Every structure is written in C-alpha cells, then in structure tokens.
C-alpha cells in the first residue's frame, strides 16, 4: 500500500522519490503501523522518537505509533521536535 509522507524541516535529508518540498509516496506492507513507517524512513540519526508525527492532520504521540495502523492514501507528516522558549 502507498501512503503520502511530508517531511518538514529535514533538509538536507531527502529520501529517493521525494520532491523538493519533502513530499513523497512511500510503499509499505499492508498492516503497517505508523511506527513501522517512521522506522522504514531511516530518518537522520535513526532516532524516530525525536520526531513528531501527524496522521491525516491529527497528532500521534510517540507512545501510540505502534498501535496506529496505516491505510492506503493516508497522509503522514513528520518533523523534528522543536526546542526553544
């Protein structure tokens, strides 16, 4: 199945098949969870827990990623946690 992934503030990281805006379609096995997708993306530093995730514009907490199944044509947004004050 394919899902759309938007990577925000990840420059210069850009997986094959992603456009200049950080958007790409990713093929994952049926039954994959959001955690499976984050792991498959091999994000910089390999620390998926450092990234925030949205599924169809709804926030998914780190602890819940493994329990959230993905469906064809879902839209996942991934961006690094922001620190500051």
Image: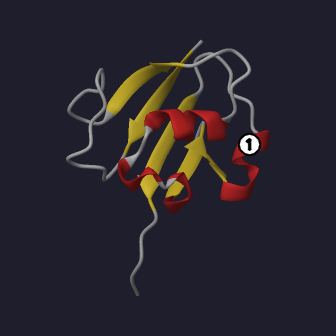
Foreground pick, 78 / 32: 32
Q: Position of residue 47 (x, y in %)?
A: 49, 55
* Residue at the (35%, 30%) spot, across then down: 23
* Residue at the (68%, 26%) spot, across then down: 32
Residue pushed farthest front? 46
Residue pushed farthest bottom? 85
Report how many numbered discs are placed on residues in the image. 1
Foreground pick, 35 / 74: 35
Does residue 61 appear in this view?
no
Residue 64 drawn above or below residue 38: below
- Left or right placement of residue 68 versus residue 57 in this view: right
According to the picture, the residue beneath numbered tag 1 turns out to be 66
Does residue 71 appear in this view?
yes
- Left or right placement of residue 55 versus residue 21 in this view: right
Q: Quadrant of residue 2?
A: top right
Q: Where is residue 62 in the image (x, y as percent from the top left)?
A: 66, 56
What colour scheme governs how the chains and residues are painted in the rendered image of this protein? secondary structure
Q: What element carries label 1?
A: helix
Please state, as top left, top right, bottom left or bottom right, where the N terminus lies in the image. Answer: top right
Q: Quadrant of residue 39?
A: top right
Q: Position of residue 70 (x, y in %)?
A: 68, 27
Foreground pick, 2 / 38: 38
Q: Where is residue 44 in the image (x, y as percent from the top left)?
A: 36, 50
Mark 1, residues whose alpha carbon is within 10 Å: few (<14), some, or many (≥20)? some
Please state, as top left, top right, bottom left or bottom right, where the C terminus lies in the image. Answer: bottom left
- Left or right placement of residue 59 versus residue 10 in this view: right
* Residue at the (43%, 20%) spot, across then down: 25
């Amino acid at each position: 199945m394919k899902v759309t992934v938007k990577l925000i503030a990840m420059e210069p990281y850009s997986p094959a098949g992603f456009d200049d805006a950080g958007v790409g379609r990713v093929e994952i096995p049926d039954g994959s969870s959001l955690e499976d997708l984050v792991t498959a993306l091999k994000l910089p530093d390999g620390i998926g827990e450092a990234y925030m995730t949205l599924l169809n514009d709804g926030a998914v907490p780190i602890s819940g990623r493994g329990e959230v199944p993905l469906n064809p044509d879902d839209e996942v947004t991934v961006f690094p946690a922001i620190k500051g004050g």
